Image (cartoon, grey):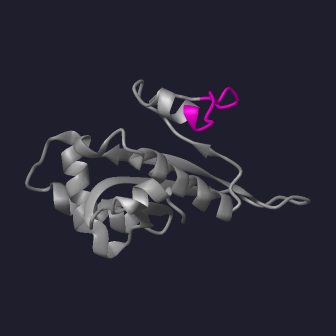
């Protein structure tokens, strides 16, 4: 994955995270919410174990310290006669620590996700943005998904 030279020159890199990165991913999730509880790390690890085969985790680091993360949940469509199965991704949990925001970290994470999705030949990436993040995703080319339906439970 190529990162903008200016970000790389400042010691920032984006890479796929793996099991060795679980403590950093847990800490970023704690920082995102500003909350913690005694069982959180164990619950997060159990969730990671269930999800790691169908999600790709990305980690942004500045001089080796974790500063951001996101993940892509990959859905593979069932093949049908006359057409390949295809697939799509759900972008989730984009987070950059406050002191690293507005420096291209989120854009670099998003670029890594998009590059990975293109390499997998996914048909689309969907997400549920916060009100604050809508302009960020719109600048990257995301548009409202009019053809989807939703049932709130």
Q: Nearer the viewer, residue 142 or 103?
A: 103
> Which residue is depicted at the point 38% across and 72% down?
18
> Which residue is depicted at the point 37% across and 44% down?
103
Question: Can residue 30 be seen?
Answer: yes
The secondary structure that dominates the magenta segment is: loop
Question: Can residue 44 be seen?
Answer: no
Residue 41 placement: quadrant:
bottom left
Q: Nearer the viewer, residue 32 or 53?
A: 32
Residue that lies at the very extreme toward the bottom in this rendered image: 20
Quarter of the image with the N terminus in it: bottom right
Residue 102 placement: quadrant:
top left
Is residue 67 highlighted in magenta? no
Residue that lies at the very extreme toward the right in this rendered image: 82
> Residue 91, position in %: x, y?
50, 47
Q: Which residues are magenta?
A: 139-149
> Residue 6, position in %: x, y?
44, 54
**From the viewer's perspective, is residue 35 above or below residue 133?**
below
> Residue 59, position in %: x, y?
37, 61
Quick check: 42 left or right of 69?
A: left
Residue 49 placement: quadrant:
bottom left
> Which residue is depicted at the point 65% across and 32% down?
148
> Residue 153, position in %: x, y?
44, 30
Quick check: 24 left or right of 19?
A: left
> Which residue is depicted at the point 61% across and 46% down?
125
Q: How many marks?
A: 0
Is residue 143 highlighted in magenta? yes
């Amino acid at each position: 994955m190529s990162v903008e030279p200016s970000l790389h020159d400042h010691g920032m890199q984006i890479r796929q995270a793996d099991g060795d990165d679980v403590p950093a991913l847990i800490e970023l999730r704690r920082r995102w919410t500003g909350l913690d509880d005694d069982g959180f790390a164990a619950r997060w690890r159990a969730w990671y174990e269930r999800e790691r085969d169908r999600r790709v985790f990305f980690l942004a680091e500045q001089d080796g310290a974790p500063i951001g993360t996101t993940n892509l949940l990959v859905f593979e469509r069932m093949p049908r006669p006359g057409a390949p199965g295809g697939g799509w991704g759900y972008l989730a949990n984009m987070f950059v620590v406050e002191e690293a925001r507005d420096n291209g970290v989120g854009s670099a994470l998003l670029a890594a996700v998009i590059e990975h999705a293109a390499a997998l030949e996914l048909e689309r990436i969907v997400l549920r943005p916060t009100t604050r993040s809508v302009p960020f995703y719109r600048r990257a080319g995301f548009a409202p998904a009019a053809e989807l339906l939703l049932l709130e439970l």
